[in-house]
Image (spheres, rainbow, N blue to C red):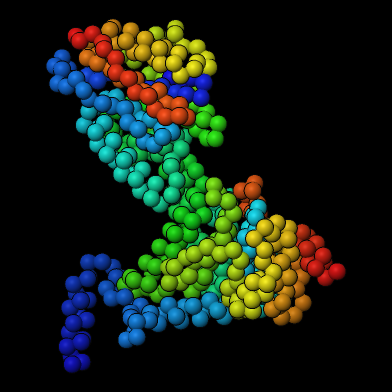
Amino acid sequence: MLNEFSNNTISLFLQKKKKKGSFFNFSLTTFSPNGKLLQIEHALKAVESGATSLGIKASNGVVIVTEKKLPTTLIDENSVKKIQKLNDGIGVIYSGLGPDYRVLISKARKKSQQYFKQYNEIIPVNIISRKVAGIMQEFTQSGGVRPFGVSLLVAGYDHNGPQLFQVDPSGSFWAWKATAIGKNSSNSKKFLEKRYKPDMEIEDAINTAILTLKEGFEGEMDEFNIEVGVITNDKKFRILEPEEVKDYISELNL
Amino acid sequence: MAGKNCVAIAGDTRFGVRNQTVALDSNRIFKINNRTLFGMTGLNTDILTLRESFKFQMNLYNLEEEREISPKTFAHNVAQTLYSKRFGPYFITPIIAGLEGEDYTPFLCATDLIGAMEFPKSFVVAGTGEESLMGVCETFYKENMEPDELFEVVSQCLLAAVDRDALSGWGSVVHVLTKDGITTKRLRTRKD
């Protein structure tokens, strides 16, 4: 039987020789007998052990925050930027593997620029979320690749108003009013359930978001170990400066 | 041609191959949605193909974006599609006319065969009789015309120019687009 297996592999090998490097024609993400995709389950575990990120959709904007826990004080925190913009009107944060996130951001930015080139319009939030989810799904059904180990929170403001989407390693995506992902997600979500009000304004939302992050924060929270990104009806996504974050934190401490 | 919160787009309906008239009912102006009209002149096969191509794209757009495309966005899409065939172009001159935004501001756009866009405020012309059309429109155009007046002006311009051009005529159609809808009228022209 072993010989058969190695014969099959070798013949596959020889057949696919024309394409460099793509000897793997079979997907690494395969179904288990009880209908689960274990690779995706494991990817979600990777997300769950990542740093907490959360987002809140207010009536006039969206806020996303994340904790930026660096392993040592020797790291230059200015060089680490977790919240990224996809274009002027959409911002993203993640929980999980940083390098996977960088690759996704790169692909998502390209897609959003392609859309702009075609239509001369900023891509709507639900459309870019769908495209990113599509990319993530490809990596669960292609040869020789593994799923991405990140969940993304996509925040934007378009013709449908403020929106907050989560995109998972499986490729599923859906919109939230408020949510948390990563280490303390279940506690943070319980906290948010109590605090969230649909007619919340953006300032209130920013305070609530930072407060929620503080609940599960290990150690002292200051303006250098969290990142805050906001978009309001001016449709420009802004990452807050440390000074502004400091103001919000000191308001909470009062 | 643009009026006050309305636009009109008109064209003849002759389809010919040099001197020979092949059809009298070729419609070259298409409705993209309630806010956008799209007309083309040039090589008939390209007109038909692009009509199908844009219908395809717009159907997908409507399904994915769950909204109607705005005239400006459509114009950019047209220009992009034409430029993608920069070195083997579609031989057409498209005109996009529509009403943009909440205030129904008139929007006109014309491009050349490889997607160079122009956004005139008053009127735009294309086709074999475009030189005559340009002259007549310049003379008869005035700003802020109401839909009825706009219809009259556009019809007269088209009729006058078409009579001067051997390759145009054999019937014409005028569409006037306002926020209440599109009115279409066919005019009798000289049949020669």
**Taking A135 as reference, is A203 left or right?**
right
Residue A118 visible, this orientation? yes
Image: A106 above or below A113: below
Location of the C terminus of chain B by quadrant is: top left
Coordinates of residue B169 in the picture (x, y in percent): 24, 14
Coordinates of residue A152 in the picture (x, y in percent): 53, 66
| Res. A92 image quadrant | bottom right
**Taking A249 as reference, is B141 left or right?**
left
Image: B48 above or below A199: above
- Taking the spot 36% from the left edge, 30% from the top edge, the residue there is B38
**Taking A54 as reference, is A210 left or right?**
right
Please state the total of marks drawn on the protein image.
0
Residue that sits furthest to the bottom in the current view:
A1
| Depth order, front residue of A79/A97 | A97
| Depth order, front residue of A23/B10 | B10
Coordinates of residue B190 in the picture (x, y in percent): 23, 8
Location of the N terminus of chain B by quadrant is: top left
- Taking the spot 52% from the left edge, 63% from the top edge, the residue there is A175
- Taking the spot 24% from the left edge, 20% from the top edge, the residue there is B13
Residue B76 visible, this orientation? no
| Res. A83 image quadrant | bottom right
